[in-house]
Amino acid sequence: MAESKYGHLVKKMNMRDTQRKIGGNADFINGFSGKDLEGLALNFTWAIHKGLGDWHAGRDPHVHPYDECLVFMGLDPDNPGYLGAEIEVGMGEEGEKVIIDSPTAIVVPGGLVHGPLITKKVDQPYGFSAICLNGEHETTWLGEG
Ligand SMILES: [Fe+2]
């Protein structure tokens, strides 16, 4: 069998069942850091969510030293503009509330406090990806939880 020249660049995404019982965080998730990605200055998650409530059990808000993008996507191929959920996201030290109810990307520059993320309504499971421009994940939790 011929040796693969590029096979090491192809990474299988095995979705892990989080067995989540409460809150709006991921039900199925996978993620990679830079060491899994041939040293890229990137870490990211890809997840499917279906629950209601606070994603991080009172630990929010939080902050990262690097830039992050929060991407919310619908999963209905017959209606790609439909998210299927309503999520409230706190932004900044002020906790300004942003409501997400359609496919959306939120830019979170490094050092910007964000959260909590609270799912208010779910009609259909949706996809979420946290894309971080750093090889290693680093989060400082600022909440009480
Ligand atoms: Fe974050």
Image (cartoon, grey):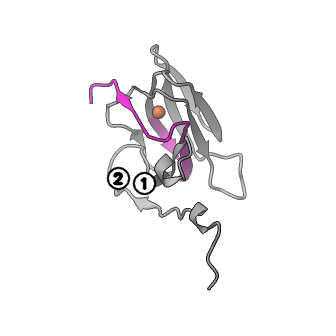
Asked if the magenta segment contains residue 126, the reply would be: yes
- Mark 1 belongs to which amino acid? Asp
- Decide which of tag 1 and tag 2 comes sooner along the chain: 2
Crowd tier of the residue under label 2, counting other residues whose Cα lies within 10 Å: few below 14, some 14–19, many 20 or above: some
Start-end of magenta stretch: 118-145
Q: Secondary structure at mark 1?
A: loop
Give the residue at mark 1.
Answer: 27
Q: What x and y, as percent, mark residue 72?
A: 59, 42
Say if residue 26 shows up in the picture.
Answer: yes
Mark 1–mark 2 CB contact (< 8 Å): yes
Relative to 82, is 108 above or below? above
In front here: 117 or 53? 117
Q: Secondary structure at mark 2?
A: loop
Relative to 64, is 72 above or below? below
Asked if the magenta segment contains residue 142, the reply would be: yes
Give the residue at mark 2.
Answer: 20
Q: What x and y, as percent, mark residue 47?
A: 50, 52
In front here: 35 or 121? 35
